[in-house]
Image (tube, grey):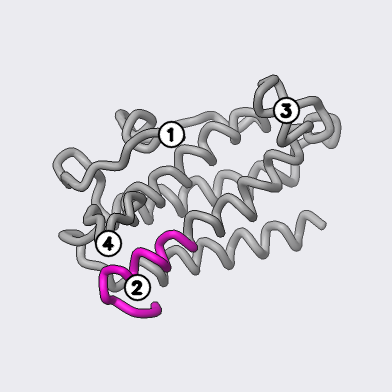
């Protein structure tokens, strides 16, 4: 099953690259038609979520300084590009975190994945670390990449 999950994770990385590939940096933080989660925030949030959950499976977080605050869950994305990473920086970090997960997961003991999620609030949705890992690798990425697709349409860019 892990091989299939890793394959899907690779497909999502390629999808992310395709969805933002033709978006100029100058547009990455715009919020057309009231869409708050712009591509910069969506990619940054995926990166920071992977760094955070990665700690649960033994991956040392090494996200760029300041990104945790910029892209936190429940945060308010800003349309001001000042201080925001470029598209190239985001894609490089997304690829780096994907590669970290792909390298680490085959060596993660099943007991780690079967362990109860350490956060009581989160446990209501993801009872085990493995459930959270599967979510981050699949549904969470596709949810936010779907937001990028909607953003593209609102920005008049059409499909990637």
Q: Measure the C-alpha gap from mark 3 to mark 2.
A: 35 Å
Q: Which one is earlier in the sequence, the residue at label 3 or at label 2?
A: 3
Mark 3–mark 2 CB contact (< 8 Å): no
Q: Measure the C-alpha gap from mark 1 to mark 3.
A: 18 Å
**2 vs 159: above or below:** above
Q: Could you tell me which secondary element the residue under label 4 belongs to?
A: helix
**44 vs 156: above or below:** above
Query: Circle 1 sits on which residue?
Result: 74
Q: Could you tell me which secondary element the residue under label 3 belongs to?
A: helix
Query: Circle 2 sits on which residue?
Result: 153
User: Residue 31's quadrant in the figure?
Assistant: bottom left
Q: Which of labels 2 and 4 is toward the front? A: 4
Query: Circle 4 sits on which residue?
Result: 33
Residue 107 in picture, x, y percent from top left: 75, 40
Q: Residue 147 colored magenta?
A: yes
**121 vs 24: above or below:** above
Q: How crowded is the residue under tag 4: few (<14 C-alpha within 10 Å), some, or many (20+)?
A: few
Q: Which one is earlier in the sequence, the residue at label 4 or at label 3?
A: 4
What segment carries the magenta color? Answer: 146-160
Q: Which of labels 4 and 1 is toward the front? A: 4
Checking the image for residue 123, the label placed there is 3
Q: Which one is earlier in the sequence, the residue at label 1 or at label 3?
A: 1
Residue 129 in picture, x, y percent from top left: 73, 33
Mark 4–mark 3 CB contact (< 8 Å): no
Q: Measure the C-alpha gap from mark 2 to mark 1.
A: 24 Å
User: Residue 1's quadrant in the figure?
Assistant: bottom right
Q: Measure the C-alpha gap from mark 2 to mark 4.
A: 10 Å
Residue at (35%, 64%) from the top-left corner? 151
Q: Is residue 99 left or right of residue 23?
A: right
Q: Residue 46 colored magenta?
A: no
């Amino acid at each position: 099953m892990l091989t299939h999950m890793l394959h899907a994770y690779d497909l999502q990385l390629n999808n992310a690259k395709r969805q933002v590939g033709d978006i100029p940096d100058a547009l990455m933080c715009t919020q057309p038609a009231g869409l708050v989660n712009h591509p910069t925030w969506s990619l940054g949030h995926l990166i920071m979520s992977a760094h955070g959950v990665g700690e649960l499976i033994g991956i040392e977080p090494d996200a760029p300084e300041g990104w945790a605050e910029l892209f936190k869950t429940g945060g308010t994305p800003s349309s001001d590009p000042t201080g925001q990473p470029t598209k190239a920086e985001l894609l490089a970090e997304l690829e780096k975190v994907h590669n970290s997960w792909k390298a680490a997961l085959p060596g993660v003991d099943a007991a780690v994945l079967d362990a109860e999620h350490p956060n009581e609030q989160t446990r209501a949705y993801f009872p085990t670390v493995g459930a959270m890992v599967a979510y981050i690798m699949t549904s969470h990425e596709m949810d936010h990449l779907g937001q990028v697709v909607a953003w593209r349409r609102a920005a008049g860019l059409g499909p990637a």
